[in-house]
C-alpha cells in the first residue's frame, strides 16, 4: 500500500466557530443548500455526529460519482478540529483503499478563519496515486469551501 499526503490551506472572512459548525457539525443541512446542483443530500447511516458516525453523501445528476460513504474519526468543537475517512464509493475507484482528511480551523488576525487540511490517500496494493485525480479532488474541496463561504455570507443567520 502506498501512502500520499497533501496539505492545503484556505482563508475566509467567516469567524472560526461559525465556519466549523457549517463545514462539520451542520454539514448535512448546509452543504446541499450551498451546492444544490452538486450535493443532493447527506444521510446519517449510524451514529450521533461524534466519532464513529457513518454518513453517506449523495451527489447530483452529472457529478463524477453518485455517492460516497465516510466515517467521522474525531471531532473537537473546542479546538475546531475534525477528521474523517472516506471508505466507500466510486471516488475510490480501484486505486484507493481509503482517503483520510483532517482539518483544523484557526482564527486569522482579521477576525476570519484559516482552514488547514491534510488529506492522505491510501492506495490499494502497489497502485500509484494518480496526480490528476488528486488535483481534481483538491480543487473540489476548495470549491466546496468557497461555496459554503458564499452561502454563509449570503445567509448571515445560517
Image (cartoon, rainbow, N blue to C red):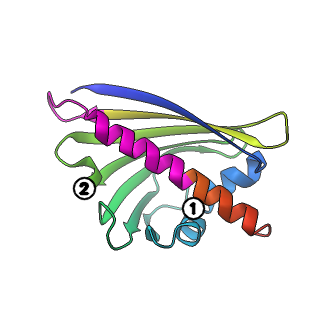
Label located before the other in sequence (1 or 2): 1
Most common SS among magenta residues: helix
State whether residue 68 is above or below residue 139.
Answer: below
Q: Residue at x 44, y 42 (%)?
A: 138
> Which SS class for mark 1?
helix
- 124 inside magenta stretch: yes
Q: Which residue is mark 1?
A: 27
Task: Give the extent of the magenta segment.
Answer: 122-144
Q: Nearer the viewer, residue 122 or 44?
A: 122
Q: Which residue is mark 2?
A: 90
> Which SS class for mark 2?
helix
Q: Which quadrant of the view contains residue 98? A: top left
Split into 4 quadrants, where in the image is the N terminus? top left
Q: From this viewpoint, which residue is outermost toward the right?
A: 110
Q: Residue at x 68, y 56 (%)?
A: 21
Q: Residue at x 37, y 45 (%)?
A: 136
Question: Can you give x and y, in whole percent of width and height, for residue 135 in the image?
Answer: 38, 39
Amino acid at each position: 500500500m502506498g501512502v500520499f499526503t497533501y496539505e492545503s490551506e484556505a482563508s475566509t472572512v467567516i469567524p472560526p466557530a461559525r465556519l466549523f459548525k457549517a463545514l462539520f457539525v451542520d454539514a448535512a443541512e448546509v452543504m446541499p443548500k450551498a451546492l444544490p446542483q452538486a450535493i443532493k443530500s447527506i444521510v446519517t447511516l449510524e451514529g450521533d455526529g461524534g466519532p464513529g458516525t457513518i454518513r453517506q453523501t449523495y451527489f447530483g445528476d452529472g457529478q463524477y460519482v453518485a455517492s460516497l460513504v465516510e466515517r467521522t474519526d474525531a471531532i473537537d468543537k473546542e479546538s475546531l478540529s475534525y477528521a474523517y475517512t472516506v471508505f466507500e464509493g466510486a471516488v475510490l475507484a480501484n486505486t484507493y483503499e481509503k482517503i483520510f482528511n483532517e482539518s483544523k480551523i484557526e482564527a486569522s488576525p482579521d477576525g476570519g478563519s484559516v482552514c488547514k487540511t491534510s488529506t492522505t490517500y491510501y492506495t490499494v496494493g502497489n497502485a500509484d496515486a494518480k496526480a490528476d485525480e488528486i488535483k481534481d479532488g483538491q480543487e473540489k474541496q476548495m470549491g466546496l469551501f468557497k461555496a459554503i463561504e458564499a452561502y454563509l455570507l449570503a445567509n448571515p443567520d445560517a
